[in-house]
Amino acid sequence: MRDYIFTSESVTAGHPDKICDQISDAVLDAVISEEVKAGGAADYIRSAVECLVTRGQVFLAGELRCHAYVDIDSVVRAVIKQIGYTDAELGFQYSSVGINNALQEQSADIAQGVDREGEIGAGDQGIMFGYACNETAELMPLAPALAHALAYRLAEVRTDATLPYLRPDGKTQVSVQYLEGKPAYVDTILISAQHADDPEAERSLADDLKAKVIAPVFERFGLGFGEAKLFVNPTGRFVIGGPAGDTGLTGRKIIVDTYGGVAHHGGGAFSGKDPTKVDRSAAYMARYAAKNVVAAGLAEQCELQLAYGIGIAHPLSIMVNTFGSAQAGLSDERIAEILPQVFDFTPSGIITTLDLWRPIYHLSAAYGHFGRELAEFTWERIDKVSQLQAAL
């Protein structure tokens, strides 16, 4: 087992790319809610909503199919307001931002492979990964878990006015030292936090973040950070932020969304996509399966790869990698063999098992899709342990 340092990052909900993810998913949630409210069937919906933000502007494009009317402009403004862009001085403000809507209906050529009675086909080809390990209680790698927790805490101390001079944009990064393949201590913490144009705030920022952000997070994880190298706003100033400082796009933070680079990623983004799109739903199912494998004690870590073809219901391949951590006498091939006995990896099976035709997606669009113990995130359940053990 080798020694190394591994680093993961996260971003706050006010980061330009994350604004786009939240808008895309809020539109999907609104469509699901309105479709059901109007008496329609949620599974008629097809969504692949893409968003771009820049100074004073929001652009929407992609595909959207539904019967119900949705006031998309109102949805967009509500998301921006909730994030905290309420001041025109930030260069991006919910009530004055321009909204450019170029959404269109899904291609008929794609739809015919998915719109079937009973067992629907995958909405696209591609590969998806799920991962779990025993480094944290949530069965997530330590570095991304800490980075997400720090980013979430940044937003918390801003919105509850503990640190009222903070602004919505921000990034975190955590480097963990591994000894003999196991996390030993945190080597480096980096936080970039947007703040008011106030010299006093700039002077107190590092001490404030240490006391109000880093300390509470590390205490919750049962960790110390006294010996860690700490960097706060390395350029010395972070006043211009959000879409006024950087263009944002849906799906540009896919490693932040998943496992912080510890595990592979198939390349497909999640936000804005309805659950017939296996880019999203199969990645959730792969996490669900991998998490239950680790919880069942079959391995200390598990990465699951699924591959799909457009219009084809069953995965084309299933591969398991436990990185040599499987219990004695148990091979990766044997785990891969039993998984379809316990988990239904068809799009219909995934949607039914995880109950995915619900307006839950806006919740997932910031601070990671995995490792968050929310009731809405059914893919985080550990309820197949006994079935996996029996299948062996």
Image (cartoon, rainbow, N blue to C red):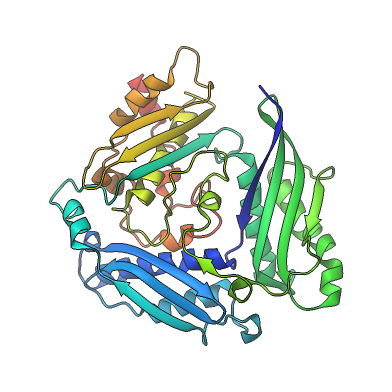
Going 21% across and 43% down the picture, which residue do you hit?
312
Name the quadrant containing residue 285. top left
Going 66% across and 72% down the picture, which residue do you hit?
241
Looking at the image, is 35 positioned above or below residue 274?
below
Q: How many marks?
A: 0
In the displayed structure, does residue 272 sit left or right of residue 246? Answer: left
Quadrant (top left/top right/bottom left/bottom right) for the N terminus: top right
Q: Nearer the viewer, residue 107 or 29?
A: 107
Quadrant (top left/top right/bottom left/bottom right) for the C terminus: top left
Q: Position of residue 139 (x, y in %)?
A: 54, 37
Going 39% across and 62% down the picture, which residue do you hit?
272
The single residue placed furthest to the left in the displayed view is 117
Q: Position of residue 317 (x, y in %)?
A: 31, 32
Q: Nearer the viewer, residue 235 or 382?
A: 235
Can residue 336 be seen in the rendering of this structure?
yes
Can residue 160 be seen in the rendering of this structure?
no
Q: Position of residue 168 (x, y in %)?
A: 64, 70
Q: Position of residue 349 (x, y in %)?
A: 26, 43
The single residue placed furthest to the top in the displayed view is 329
In the displayed structure, does residue 125 sit left or right of residue 162? Answer: left
